[in-house]
Amino acid sequence: MHKLQLTIGEIVEPGQPASVPLDATVEEGLKRLRAAHPTCLLVMDGERLAGIFTRKDAMVRVACANIDPAATAMSEVMTPDPETLTLSHRVIWAINRMVSGGYRNIPVIDESGTPVAVLGVSQVTAQLDEMFEELALPLVDTEESPWVDIGGGA
Amino acid sequence: MNPFEALASAPLHKVNQRTLVRVRATDTVADALQKMLDAKRGAAAVVDDDGLVGMFTEGDVLMKALNADVDMNTATVGELMTPDPVSMRDDDTFENAIAILRKRGFHHLPVYGTDGRPNGVISVRDLLAYVADHFPQEFLNLPPERQEWGEYGG
């Protein structure tokens, strides 16, 4: 099995991705985004995934827009209704979506639509890096060949 | 050479690089942000007369510029940039770029041309786009989800 054929479920650990509620302030969102160094936050409307807030959003919609983070809700600066992947999607498909959509992070949802992970470009580059490392490994014959000494002669 | 080895050994001048957004260490953060916004880039190269002295990225904006005690109209890029950036050369390989992005957690790498000057920047998404553009067609034609039967024929 090639690494790019792996499913997302095989390379991410399902859990609870970093998130904030829809009505949180941008100030709270920025604090959360800085604290654990996640690359993005999921913005939740109760159990429903309402949006995503990335470092790019922090730059473009907060820093460049000169808004007051303490007086602005996350709902105003997030990207609403983000594209999602499931645990059964392949890594190569995720690359396709990241390139086509211009995403660096894509939420991963389970069968009920609940976010269980975020697939980031760093996890994809890790797969490529490991794939290249394997290419560089010398070929070692692990099985004993019955034709060890072909000798010379006619 | 199989397609994966060809991908690993591809020189970076084959990857679609973006032109550098150049700022000076003495520029204000607000001016640098405006240049990045105009060019739709998440990173700017900080240059002096001798060349590259730093990178100013979305990460610097989030972690440093968006702090309440930073006035982006007076703070300079030099105060907040990441100095001594890791850079690549045009003839470095795709594999090396992926390895550095993975190990260092960067999203952008400045690239020096054969003239010894920083000429472009490669983002992690540019590298993924190269995978999508140059991977064997049969991979990209795979269904997004792994199927139990049928995809390999026979």
Image (cartoon, grey):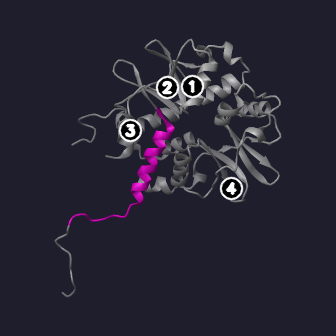
Return the residue nearer the eye: A96 or B24.
B24
* Left or right, B38 with reference to B59: right
* Left or right, A133 with reference to A35: left
Nearest-to-viewer mark from 4 and 3: 3
Q: Which mark is residue A18?
A: 2
Q: What's the magenta region?
A: A119-143
User: Is most of the magenta stretch helix, strand or loop?
Assistant: helix
How far apart are labels 4 and 1 at the CA level?
39 Å
Which numbered disc flags the more N-terminal residue, 1 or 3?
3
Q: Is residue A84 magenta?
A: no
Q: For mark 2, does the 10 Å Cα neighbourhood hold few (<14), some (14 to 19), or many (20 or more) residues?
A: some
Q: Are marks 4 and 3 in contact (CB under 8 Å)?
A: no
- Name the amino acid type tagged 4: Gly
What is the x, y in percent for residue A89? 37, 32
SS assignment at label 2: loop
The residue at which mark 1 appears reads as A32
What is the x, y in percent for residue A75? 58, 14
SS assignment at label 3: helix
Chain identifier of the residue bearing label 3 in the image: A
